[in-house]
Image: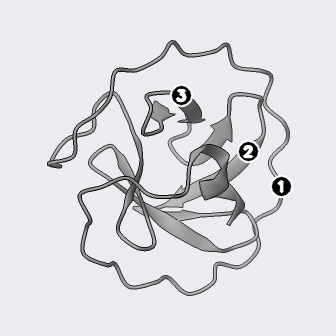
Amino acid sequence: MNFYDCNGRPIAYLDDDGEHIYLFNGKPVAYLYGETIYTFSGHHIGWYENGWIIDLRGYYVFFTENSSGSGLGRPGRHGVPGKSGKHGLPGKSGRHGEYGKPGKCLSWSNLSGEQFFNQ
């Protein structure tokens, strides 16, 4: 499953294991724990819901081919680049506390592309 930004550019993808998120250059950047998204250093950075990635303030960051349930329009998708070989997974630090879920904002996040994963 590929994650596209507000301009329709593919930024990252969910591995076949359904847990780890990689950039197309092969770098692992985050993982899913239920619907919660964490960095490997244990920081909670957002949620995955109905094919959307939502940031900590409730703004939409990425969409997938199957995203649904939002009033937010999806732009046309760009072609997907080839995937580089996957780098080894870093160790997972203990997860920090999960933030409370804010109400959803029907607009795009200021965090674009890889910025979301570098919080």
Q: Quadrant of residue 39?
A: bottom right
Q: Amino acid at mark 3?
A: Pro
Q: Are marks 1 and 2 in contact (CB under 8 Å)?
A: yes
Query: Residue 50 vs residue 91: left or right?
Result: left
Q: Secondary structure at mark 1?
A: loop
**Circle nearer the N terminus (3, 2):** 3
Q: Residue at x 57, y 73 (%)?
A: 44
Circle nearer the N terminus (1, 3): 3
Please say if 84 is above or below 55: above
Marks 1 and 2, how far apart at CA: 8 Å
Q: Nearer the viewer, mark 1 or mark 2?
A: 2
Give residue 28's mark: 2
Residue 62 visible in the displayed image: yes
Q: Which is closer to the viewer, label 3 or label 2?
A: 3
Query: In the image, is 24 to the left or to the right of 38?
Result: right
Query: In x, y percent, where is residue 94?
Result: 71, 79
Residues under labels 1 and 3: Cα distance? 23 Å
Name the residue: 65% across, 74% down.
43
Report whether residue 15 is seen: no
Q: Is residue 24 left or right of residue 61?
A: right
Q: CA distance from mark 3 to mark 2?
A: 15 Å
Of helix, strand and loop, which one carries label 3?
strand
Residue 105, x across and y down, in percent: 26, 65
Q: Which mark is residue 112?
A: none
Label 3: few (<14), some (14–19) or many (≥20) C-alpha neighbours in 10 Å: many
Q: Which residue is mark 3?
A: 10
Determine whether the residue tagged by mark 2 lies in a helix, strand or loop.
strand
Q: Which residue is more in the foreground, 19 or 55? A: 55
Q: Earlier in the sequence, mark 1 or mark 2?
A: 2
Check disc 1: other Cα within 10 Å, few if <14, some if 14-19, many if 20+: few
- Measured as percent of width and height from the top left, residue 46 is found at 48, 65
Q: Which mark is residue 90?
A: 1
